[in-house]
Structure formats: C-alpha cells, structure tokens
Image (cartoon, grey):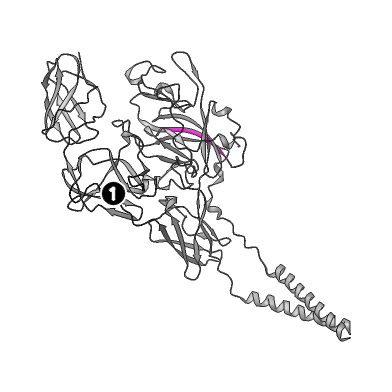
Amino acid sequence: MQSLKHIFLLLVSGLILAGGCTKTEDLPPLSQSRMLSFKVPTADGDIIGAIDESDKTITVYVPFYHQFAVIDPEIILSEGAKLEEESLPVNVLEGDVQYTVIGNDGSRTTYSLTIHLQQITPFTISEPSTEELIAKWEVGYGMVSIRANFNTTDPSNITVYLVDETGAEHPLIPNTALGHVGVEPVIIGDGQKTYSFGNLQIPQELTPGLYHLKVNMLNLSATSTYPVELVWGKPSAFIYAPVTIKAGETFTLETGSISLHDVREVSFSVNGGKLPLEIVEWDYKKVIARVPADLAPGTYIPSIVCGDFEPASPGWWGITIAE
Amino acid sequence: MNMKYTYFSSTSTLLAVFLMGTLVLTSCSKSDDPQPDPDLEPGTDVYYKLHRIENFAVETDDENPTQAKSAVLFSLFTKEEVPSSHAKTTRWDISFNGLYNSFLGGNNGSNSNNVAYGGAGKGGVVILEKEFDDVKEIPADGQFNAKSGIIGTDDAGAFGEGIGWYLYDFGGTILGDGTEQKEHVAYALGSPLTTNAGTVIPARTIIVKTPKGDYAKIKMISCYKDAFIPDAWFKDTPHMFFTFEYVIVPAGSTQFEIKP
C-alpha cells in the first residue's frame, strides 16, 4: 500500500511538472528585437537609461555637472540582434533620436530616446549695463569676460552673442592670443559664487551701436535686459609682423584687437619728426601704406591715427627698409 | 497509523515540490546575462600591426601664431579625426592641443585638465627617450600623464617644456644653417638628431594608454606636408601635417609587439 502511494505521488508530481513546462512553452515567445540595456559611461559611473517596453521609449537624465555636449551610449540587445544603424554619439539637445533593433528572427522594434538635460535654473547673466548707465565696449576689444551662473568650467558648451537692433546675432570669439579661454569660478562681493567666461573678443567687423548680450549654455539661454553700446576705440594691439621691404614698396599694419576706423594718417617716426606715408587702402582689420621711394635704409616704427584718437603704434617693432 | 500517513504525506509533498522546483529550474530556466553588442567594440584587427598616418592636417594660421586653435581629436582605431563635440566620449585616443596644435595628450575623463573631462576615458600619455623599435615594455599605469596638451616642445630647442616630441629651432641655428628658411622649424624627434654643436638628441617615442585601456606607441615623424626628413623642413613648408607611425596592443598587454 505504501509503495502504491509513493508511485501515485510521483506520477502526480510528474504530471504537474509536465503540465507546468507545457504551459511555459505555450507563452508567446519573447521578442528577439529587444533593447536590454542603455547606459552612458561617465568618469564616475554609468548613467542608466530607463527602457519602457510598453511604449518603447528610452529615458535618460543627464546631470549638468557632467558637462556633456553629447552622450555616447552603450547598448545591449537581445542575443543575435543588431541595430539597424550604427549607434553614434547623440547631441544632448537632440529631440528626435530613434533606435531600430532587428532581431535574430527578423522582428523589428523601434525605441525613441528622450534626453532630459538637468540644468540649474534660472540661468542669469551679470548685466554689464544698468538702467542709468550703459556700458561702452570698443569694437574689436578682446578682453570681454561674461559672468553668469554657468555651473560648468567647459567653455565649449557656452556661446555668447551680441544681438543688434535687427535681431542679428554676432558671436563673440574666444581670444586665445591672451592664453587659455576658459570658465573659472569666482567669488563676488557678496560672497556668492559665480563663473567668469573669458577672454572673448568683440567681432572687429561690427559697427558702433546698441547691442544686447545673449548667452546660450546647452538648453538654457539668457539675454541682458539693458544693452551695451559699441564705440570706436584707439587700436592698441598690432599683430607682430616685422617686415623688410625696399623704399617705394608697401607694408601692412594689422590690428589684433580694437578695430581700425577712419584711418586718417599713417606715418614713420624719423629723427624725432613725423614722416607721413601714402595710405593705399584700409579696412577695419588692416591698413596698407607705401613708403617713399627715396626713404633711407633703416628700421622705422610706424603709427596710425584713427578718427580723433591719439596716434597708435606697435611701439617696439618696426618696418625695415633694405638697401 | 493516521499519524504515520500524515508524516508520509508531508514528506512526499515536499519531495514533489522539491523535484518540481529542481526540474523547473533546470528545464525551463535560461541564462539571460546580456552581453555587449560586439559591433560596438572597435575592430581588433588593428592590434599588433604597424600603422602609418601621413599628412594628418590641422588648421593653421601663421598670421596669428600665438592664437591656439581648438583641440583636434584623433582615433588610432579609425585613423580619422573625431569631432570636437565628441571630446567626452571614448571614440578618440590622442588630442592635439595648444599652439599649432602641437601638444599631445590622451583621453582621460577624470582629469579636469583634459578635454575629455567628465567622460569615461581612462587614458594618458608618456614620452620616452628611446627609439620606437626599442620600446618593448609598456610603462606602468602610474607613469601616464592624464592632462591634455602635455607633450610638445623639447627642452633641447626654444620654448621647451620638458621632454617633447619636437625641437623648435626658433633662430634656425640649432639644427638649421642659420638662413631665414630654417628659422621657426619644428624638428620631429622620431629619430635621433645631432645639433650643430654636436649634441646628439635621442629619439623620442610617445606611449599612449587609450581611453579603453589599450596601449599604443607612436613615432612622430614630421609635421610638414609630404616632407619626412629634416633636410626637407623649412619655414615655409606647408604645416601642420602630422605624419606618424604606431602600434597598438590590447589592454592587459605588458609588451609591444608586431605579429605577422
């Protein structure tokens, strides 16, 4: 009797097992074109993307402190599956990125990526001007620094513009002639921490007038309430280019900073006096002048006069007139 | 009797459940450990081979010699320039920074002075006073410098910053003949050079740890277009066109070797 009971129980167990396995096999097969994992490697671990199989979406939250302009995800797919197109770095401001997974069985599943760039708001810039006092910047000036709560030291994510009265945007240029152009944290008067981005150069081709300051940083943007005024200035920095020419030939004097305007005079200093030269042509960047055909050989320091400003000169290098 | 039956019944049930569980686990389970898509990894056919890049051009502006351009990024695997927007990815191995983009560095996301800062790169560079062919052993990880723009002008020339991959002959008198065309020439130190004063400057070899942990040794040959020997380098020879040779070995290697 005992033996029969054992046999009976084993048979029942077997039937249950058989039934259980059969039921698992009856389930619809899993898709072979699934995205199993989506992660973004960083210096301090991975950012994990949330894959939602119900609506086929991938959601990634990218904290501001990573300072990423793009993310380069590592994607894991179902066994044997592959992406229809190569996975490339994705701009964090990109709004419409899709991944189509092609399964081993030929099935296809398309996932949509959403990137949430987590930045600290509001984004505010320090106003150069006030309601009472409009800041004056010289056209071509190359040491502009912008202060704002950038919360980044990566200048590549920041663009600064001057916006003219027509709405046209003129980007300021990183001025590497003065060294590294970067973003540095600074403590301002009230003990608060902010960031300074410089040195930037005002485009030399701009003309005087009122401009608003606009700063873009990834998906944030801020525009000054009050404009700055661009004005002409006295050229102060010339590009180092000593040349050797013969009497009667021309040379070029080029400004590396403040723009040229209304060039009224180009001259050499000779024996304590001034020798005016022929101005062949000029624009905001350079002036071409011709030396007299009878000028004695030697090295002469040139200078120019723009508008009503005092003469400007490279000061320490000159134009050599050869024999 | 009743007690005995009850005992027997419980044991059988437990046995059945145990068996069932075991069978279910062994017959119906399946290993689902995901593996990275192998297509995402760089090709391995680049390992243990001598590669040569000729005339890799970066933008140069001789009219503004003191204004550094943006860093240029290069992949030793694809042999192509990588967009600067991808700086914080592991898709590039060496960067060309600074004046004339002549200062080299690796890809390291943990160093705030690296253009890859924040990214997953774990690379660096180190330079050895040794000929390319003689560099066999891979330096210890601690010897790699993680900053960008760290290897450039050599102390043997003007504006030297330590051991560099090139000698800058400002006046054209260290290695040149003193003529104007030999001024401002950058002499790559991939091979030993002898100065006019008779000093032999040993060859330099750059070792790169890539962001994914592989290792490369690099011989810098020239920064002048289609000119690969010092006699062909002049002030007005088109530049910067980098020519270099390299070998890559996979992460975990201790030796550089070339395999047929």
Q: Position of residue B222 (x, y in %)?
A: 43, 29
Vertically, is A314 above or below A65?
above
Residue A4 visible (yes or no): no
Corner quadrant of residue B143 = top right
Relative placement, left or right, of A172 versus A166 is: right
Which residue is identified by label 1?
A126
Looking at the image, how many numbered discs can be counted on the residues? 1
Q: Position of residue A215 (x, y in %)?
A: 29, 50
Where does the N terminus of chain B fall, quadrant-wise? bottom right
Residue furthest bottom in the image: B2
Relative placement, left or right, of A43 versus B178 is: right
Residue B95 visible (yes or no): yes
Vertically, is A159 above or below B259?
below
- Residue at disc 1, secondary structure: loop
Relative placement, left or right, of B29 versus A82 is: right
Q: Amino acid at mark 1?
A: Ser
Q: Position of residue A15 (x, y in %)?
A: 74, 80
Residue plotted at (55% across, 68% down): A31
Residue furthest front in the image: A190
A123 or A6, nearer to the observer = A123
In the image, which residues are magenta? B242-260
Chain that bears disc 1: A
